[in-house]
Image: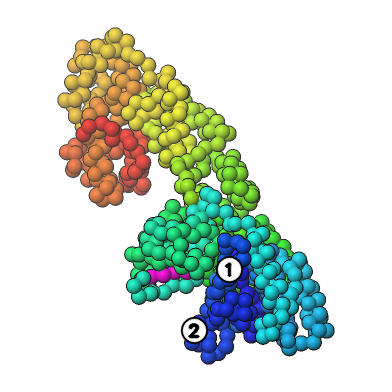
Amino acid sequence: MIVGTAGHIDHGKTTLVRALTGVDTDRLPEEKARGISIELGYAYLNVPDHDERLGFIDVPGHEKLVHTMLAGASGIDFALLLIAADDGVMPQTREHLAVLSLLGLSRGAVVITKADRAEPERLAALAEEARVLLAGTGLATAPVLTVSATTGRGLDALRELLFTASRALPPRSSQGLAARLAVDRAFSLDGVGTVVTGTLHTGEIAVGDELVIQGPHGLAMARVKSLHAQNRAVERARAGQRCAVALAGLAREQAARGQWLTAPAVALTTDRIDARLTLWPGEAKPLRSGARVHMHLGAQAVMASVAVLDGDAIAPGGSALVQLLVHAPVGAWHGDRFVLRDAGASRALAGGLVLDPFAPTRYRRTPERLAELSARELPTAARRRARLLELAPLGLDLARCAQAEGLAEPGQGWALGDSACVALTGQLLVRVAAFHAQFPDELGPDAARLRRLVAPRMAEPLWRQLLEQLLAGGRLAQRGAFVHLPEHGVQLSAVEQRIAQKVAPRLALAGVEGAWARDLAKDCAEPEPLVRATLARLARQGDLHQVVKDLYCDTATMTTLAATARRLGAEQGKVTAAAFRDATGMGRKRAIQHLEHFDRVGLLRRVVDEHRLRADSALFAEQPT
């Protein structure tokens, strides 16, 4: 169990920890000289008859060092809010209480210190004042104890309270969650190398693990060389423990307070976070959209702007969905708690719970998006995913979902809900039928073009999955890159097969210039209407390609021309008629006709006088060049 001491400066936090554990958490020379804690300090105490240690985080109380207190508070399981008997409740007492409450902490106690300096009446009045102070907070039912580190009064009772709380504390769930440690210190040790310390928020870390740290220059891989948990050398550490991790392959300058050490699968940074935010009841004014705040999450502290999503403002004591635009990338995962301080960093004003670290930049207030955020507030990952799947008309990215949740098991692929699958299938079949009616002489659209017609925002992998299901079920057919209804690709009659055999060598000989239907009929000595009908049927099957009305090219020629267009598009970023003409040796008119045909079938797209390559098109790519 991690115990955090909080309270106003010089209210005896460090002295109390030393009396309980025998460890002086003021370790810096400046701290010794000034008599105050500047950095987070740590000490440990064994729990009798229990295979566990209490880890104490001694956080600074000076007003200018509250950000350091917040870095430690995010990992606390049990809080000790200290009030000196000779001083009473002070400004930082109130702010530290607000921070602990806004972080959702509900386990703790108030400790009235320096009891040897006050009369019994004063101590009783302070205890009653403390109970009034706690009312309406998460620590409202916390006990109030009186101690003196100098005389030893009350220390045994306080230790027993902590031991009992430790034995009753349920372990932080490691089940299904990946390792995430919030780095609050980083340093180098001779013979060891780079060491980072922090509270392991979720998951487990073992010696030999490959982890990722999010540094100022991006992600860096590192291997766990050795590991201490609760100040003991161990082979494995679990969620909720204070850890010191020696990392191989990581330079000291790559690690700093505020970063996250995580399993590679869940490493992420974001600058937009959707969250549930609660404004501290003691605030005098509502919190409105556009407010600039200091955001404290894990061991990070960054500036952010607030946008209220389900209203214009949050009243004191009220709660609302918000989007936080963070001014520097941060690590954040679903369920993480954070605290906001005002722009002047003078007080804690709100606390929140991360719902989605991948918040959208557009459509963030639509009913659909608010329904998604409501789904993300459900209590279990399984229920959240099931509900999000119901709400996703274009499918759910399972890998992204697992990453946002910090799950140890990476998500695989995409999923589509039953109702969305039925709706998309209906749209797809209607669109293919409409294409056949509009272009009866073409076999059908290619798969990429069909996606743009039906679901342009759907992820390519999920689109292929849907298409494969329809092909396997016989509801669609595909020839090359072209998709069509099964009844649209009819078989040739014996007469049509004879004509097809006659025109094939003539089309091959015609090359990029193509051949006109009337000329093919004349050369083959066949009735022109019959040749036209056969050519149209061959085009519907994908065996021929009608460039303009009655002008046909064979597939081998079109594949060669498509390869040229792809090369020009890759080299120049565009395909112009002049460049295409020069590369193929055909005339300008015919070059324009071929490019316009490629526009129609979906290999290219027209942008003013240029043609741009569609990167997702597989037209002709499956044919040898």
Colouring mode (rainbow / by chain / secondary structure / one colour): rainbow
Where disc 2 sits, the SS reads loop
The reply to whether residue 517 is visible in this rendering is yes
Instruction: Establish if 173 lies above or below 508.
Output: below
Residue most extreme to the top: 494
Q: Amino acid at mark 2?
A: Leu
What quarter of the picture does the N terminus occupy?
Answer: bottom right
Residue at image point 56% right, 71% down: 44
Mark 2 or 1, nearer chain start: 2
Q: Position of residue 81 (x, y in %)?
A: 68, 74
Residue at image point 50% right, 28% down: 430
Q: How many marks?
A: 2
Q: Amino acid at mark 1?
A: Asn
Instruction: Establish if 584 lies above or below 342.
Output: above
Q: Position of residue 431 (x, y in %)?
A: 48, 30
**Magenta-colored segment: predominant secondary structure:** strand
Instruction: Establish if 416 lies above or below 439.
Output: below
Q: Quadrant of residue 365?
A: bottom right
Q: Position of residue 510 (x, y in %)?
A: 18, 27
* Side of 164 relative to 128 (left or right): left
Residue most extreme to the bottom: 33
Residue at image point 19% right, 42% down: 583
- In this view, the residue in front, 221 or 623, is 221
Please give the label number shown on residue 46. 1
**Residue that badge 2 annotates:** 28
Instruction: Establish if 588 lies above or below 275.
Output: above
The residue segment tinted magenta is 194-198
Q: Position of residue 343 (x, y in %)?
A: 59, 75
* 230 part of magenta stretch: no
